[in-house]
Image: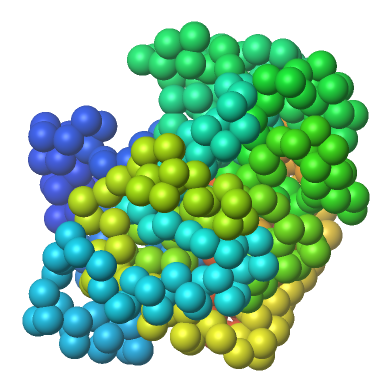
Amino acid sequence: MIGTAFVSRRSSLSAGLFERSTRVVPGGVNSPVRAWSAVGGEPVFVGRGQGARIFDEDGRGYLDYVCAWGPLILGHAPRPVVEAVVRAVPEGTGFGAPTAKELELAELVCERIAGIEQLRLVNSGTEATMSAIRLSRGYTGRNKVLKFDGCYHGHVDALLARAGSGVASFSLPDSAGVPESFTGQTLIADFNDVASVRNLVRENHQDLAAVIVEPVCGNMGVIPPEPGFLEALRELTREYGIVLIFDEVITGFRVARGGAQERYGVTPDLTCLGKILGGGLPVGAFGGRREIMSCLAPAGPVYQAGTLSGNPVTVTAGLATLKELAAPEVYRELEEKGRRLEEGLQGVLDQGIRGTVNRVGSMLTLFLGPDRVGAPADARTSDRDRFARFFHGMLARGIYLPPSPFEALFVSLAHGEDDIAATVAAFADWAEEDSRR
Ligand SMILES: *Cc1c(COP(=O)(O)O)cnc(C)c1O
């Protein structure tokens, strides 16, 4: 059953705000994942955040594992970022002219991410992937793009497509409003299935501009790449002169200091960044080999632009965040916290609940139902009703999880050992209650 705390909260300020919101905002939210379509109920309106906690408009606190969907690796309102932003704002919030701060951030990213020799800042992850695709097409003079079933790259028309069953050559759009002719240039392969990629690449290599992948799948829950998968993508794309794009919007600065490409030792031609890079403010970036990046206007023929790109306040927040992530110990700490949470949750599952935990560093997903999730198809076998009960049961116990079974939990540096222990205890308590249903 849904906890009583959940039910009583419905008569609250937060609920009134949602009701008002549905009148002026489609579905009441500015991004679909924020609505609780997968779990039922109405979303909590958040008033503020501090450290590992958020507080709703009624002042109720929750331990937060959404962390703004990934950006807040230092937790909410971290002092070094807040202070840097507060110092930056009175200096002016935008010029539409180059600044030294943008240069500083670009140099820092080039130093940290192996595959980036040059980069351009944009305002969202969606813009980054959209621009990386256009650039790949301009650079190669080819039109097709290969993506993976279950990988999300923002709401770019051509990338809003996934295969039905097995490997479909050409796929239909996932969204109304996307012409079939747009996704008709998009091929879909299966994540962690090298043969599916090899076949499509061999058949289409003369028309194939890019292969784009989340090096750790993070948008069907966390699914790590199997050993050899990323290496095989690297070899195949190199052999046929196809641009390999790693979408590191989640994994960049998350799974290692130098992103997934450092963690797995595979360097792509282009990398897309976002989320952590903006320190909680809107941002995106794409970068890569100089030879490819120099095709961008004004250096080359591929047009790409942005009025607010490289915004000084965003760049300040990003720089302050990346400076906090400079030391290797930070990533050891994130790994250790992630490991503790994984082991704790797994320990509860071992008491007789079917499910599994997938984790890479400080991002993890608890899948209820399947014993093993090695591909998005496995994730889709999750028990959605049980997840909805789990979500509301945890919420009633003061733990705020992503409101979908197919999302990653993010552990931040602000999450303490006691917070993680409390989360595991809440899961055990819920599991005990749910077993008596
Ligand atoms: C979040 C995300 C995006 C889109 O970023 P936005 O800033 O929401 O446009 C792209 N790729 C991946 C892997 C993401 O997780």
Quarter of the image for residue 145 reads top right
Q: How many marks?
A: 0
Q: Is residue 263 above or below residue 199?
A: below
Residue drawn at 66 percent across, 87 percent down: 328
Q: Residue at x 18, y 60 (%)?
A: 96
Query: What residue sits 62% from the left and 56% below the top?
Result: 289
In the displayed structure, 430 sits above or below 33; it is below
- Residue 316, x across and y down, in percent: 31, 77
Identify the image quadrant of residue 93.
Answer: bottom left
Tell which of 401 and 231 is nearer to you.
231
Q: Is residue 199 left or right of residue 127?
A: right
Q: Is residue 281 visible?
A: yes
Left-right relation of 363 to 37: right
Q: Is residue 108 above or below residue 372?
A: below
- Where residue 198 sits in the image (x, y, percent)? 86, 28
Front residue of 54/222: it is 222
